[in-house]
Amino acid sequence: MIRACLAALALIAPAAALAQTAAPVPAALPGPAEGPRGTGDLGVVIERATGSVLVVDQSDRAALCRVEGLGDLSHASLTFSPDERFAYVFGRDGGLSKVDILTCTLENRIVQGGNAIGGAISDDGKLVAVSNYEPGGVKVFDAGTLEQVADIPMGSKTVGLADAPGSRFVVATWDTGEVWVLDHSVDPANPQVTKIEGVGANPYDALMTADGRTYIVGLFGEKGLTTIDLWADPPQPRRILPDYGKNQPDLPVYKMPHLQGWTLAGSTYALPAVGLHQVLWVDAASGEESGRTDVAGQPVFVTARPDARELWVNFATPDNGTVQVIDGLTHEVKQTLQPGKGILHMEFTPRGREVWLSARDDNKVVILDARSYEKIGEIEAQAPSGIFFTARAHRTGL
Amino acid sequence: MIRACLAALALIAPAAALAQTAAPVPAALPGPAEGPRGTGDLGVVIERATGSVLVVDQSDRAALCRVEGLGDLSHASLTFSPDERFAYVFGRDGGLSKVDILTCTLENRIVQGGNAIGGAISDDGKLVAVSNYEPGGVKVFDAGTLEQVADIPMGSKTVGLADAPGSRFVVATWDTGEVWVLDHSVDPANPQVTKIEGVGANPYDALMTADGRTYIVGLFGEKGLTTIDLWADPPQPRRILPDYGKNQPDLPVYKMPHLQGWTLAGSTYALPAVGLHQVLWVDAASGEESGRTDVAGQPVFVTARPDARELWVNFATPDNGTVQVIDGLTHEVKQTLQPGKGILHMEFTPRGREVWLSARDDNKVVILDARSYEKIGEIEAQAPSGIFFTARAHRTGL
């Protein structure tokens, strides 16, 4: 969900969310399991202030171990290998780290660029791609060895990198307003490039729908959003929501919302309004706005529970201690929660039973029952941000 | 996908598909991995004639080991624990076997009924439910120990057992035409029961949509299908497709199609016609038929590639050596394949890169590239039927 990281934030308003809390002394952890264990219920929590990640066990609601030395994780995201054993962590400093979550070791680490903003893994698990601000473009690595396979300069910073079926990656260019589709299926080192121009001014983030068909680009320099149907030949940009991004003059934008926070519930998209205390509802077929829900602050993520019966929303500062739950049918706020200080991210267990929230300023991960909203656990963590469960390994566009 | 097993077949036409092939002498297998390994890329293949299962590795396209002694697997299905380490195998003889796929051992086995037809695991991974023909009803077991937790007699054979969010199971009753929703969230041993009557004559199978919202019941004694919206309070039966199940007089029904083979591609369901050489297209919102595609035989499974760009169809005897690929946009057959003899099941790798097919009468699993249709591997297996990849652990209704 936060794969492309805080792209807009990094580009336009870095100061607001870089505030970090003094990390506590790490607690002793049990360490990796002895003997065989499955990996379907594991997860990784980014500890943004300390360059470390915490490996967690969903079944026990506990941390297993900490892996350190990953560099600057102030805007980090990660993807998993298909066997759910390795996490590829994309650091802000251009670091690409391969973490073995079963043995709790940093298996490999390279610094592949000067300033990076997220990555993706190909659908066969063989290629890991990273999008860079510095030097721009996309670099592609062998998932086993982290040796460079391809370097695709694009004359631009890149954002919103996502995988698509068939060994493809899709990315948007901040400076030139393009979308590039890289097809590595024939020759991994020399991808076939399909360039889609006229996407709009300054893409700041993008998302891929779960079927790998539709790529949606957020624009910083223009109103509206651009969608691209990757099944079309050739793919064409289509502008939707012409008023999206329009701001009230008296409300500063604390944080551009994550497009990965978008949610498709039934045939409707829910998306965080930019700079407004609202969630917008958009008809997926027509691309037109169908309604709005007033919420407690500027929304960052609007995340559906896996059954899409509810949508959970977190907020930019100063409302980042609040989480609201919206009914997927009525579109009304049904619950307002105060689960902790500095809620940066929410991750549901794969079948929606629990939701794990990173409370950065409480230095813990808070675990709630996703139906009763009761707190059922918490895990000490050092300024946690993104939470990633291994089930992501099996999904497209994450 | 084949969770409720060959329900209709077992009830009405057992002879046709019970033909089994002499199994080959099993090949030596490498055995379980030494040292840590992830479980996200593992799978289990049912060997229907020999009461055994084969543990397979998607990444290596190879078998790892065989686990034997599981009883009558002539109509078997299975579910996985949330950590993707254990498979719960539901045998035709009422056997419930817990297999450790990491160590390749039969960890536990009970015979919980006289004649069983499938099972499910609760969304928290704590309860395993089995639906029985003999003695009827549903029994629920502790997923750790296989000790019985609850016994819910229903005065009927039961079919189409599926999990729903919130520690619930949903099942249809063959004899009495009801659907029961069992809610184990408050007291696992004493589920709250919601009974929905008037579902129709002789439900023979059912499926749950991936969001756990809609339960769809196939009827043997009446035309049409019944859908139930589990978000409604109270849930009500709604009849759709009033002509579904209508047969041409000159075409015997070799096999009632699997409802689990149903596929939702976009806003359209694709489903196998009963006794006809056709796939039907149904508008999901209205429940009305929107078109038909002529295919090479009586379809059994209509399975979408994970991106839903294509749908793959296999067929009842005598056409079970053929597989057809239908374009998800045009609804036209785009490819006809002959991948092997006696194709009983198709399973896609989670992100749709490959499709694995069980060729029962060739005693092998055939692996195709899901885009080029080229054969990229095969695995020796003894009369293989269902193929189950561990990614199923993370999905609702499987």
Image: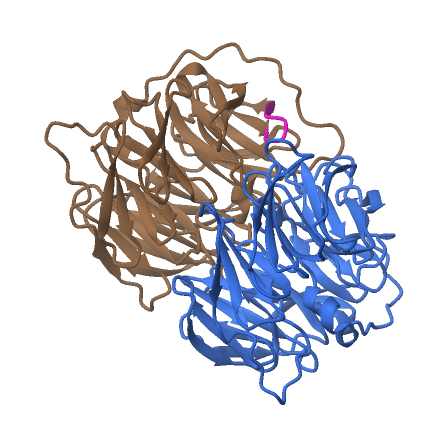
Chain colours: A blue, B brown
> In the orientation shown, which residue stands out farthest toward the left?
B249
Q: Where is residue B61 in the image (x, y as percent from the top left)?
A: 59, 25
Q: Is residue B198 above or below residue B62?
A: below
On screen, residue B325 above or below A39: above
> Residue B379 placed where, x, y %?
54, 20
Q: Nearer the viewer, residue B254 or B76?
A: B254
Can residue B96 be seen from the camera position used here?
A: no
Q: Whole-percent x and y of residue A337?
A: 60, 78
Q: In this view, does B203 lie to the left or right of A299?
A: left
**Which quarter of the figure is the C terminus of chain B placed in?**
top left
Q: Quadrant of residue A221?
A: bottom right
In the figure, is residue B193 to the left or right of B98? left
Magenta part of the protein: which range?
B57-63
Left-right relation of A378 to B166? right
Q: In which quarter of the image is the N terminus of chain B?
A: top left
Foreground residue among A126 and B202: A126
How many badges with numbers are in the image? 0
Residue B62 covered by magenta stretch: yes
Q: Residue at point 33% right, 55% down?
A: B180
Which residue lies most toward the right here? A25
User: Which residue occupies 23% across, 31% down?
Assistant: B277
Q: Is residue A233 visible?
A: yes
In terms of depth relative to the viewer, which is nearer, A297 or A218? Answer: A218
- The percent coordinates of residue A307 (x first, y second) are 47, 59
Q: Residue A235 magenta-drawn?
A: no
* Frontmost residue, A87 versus B393: A87
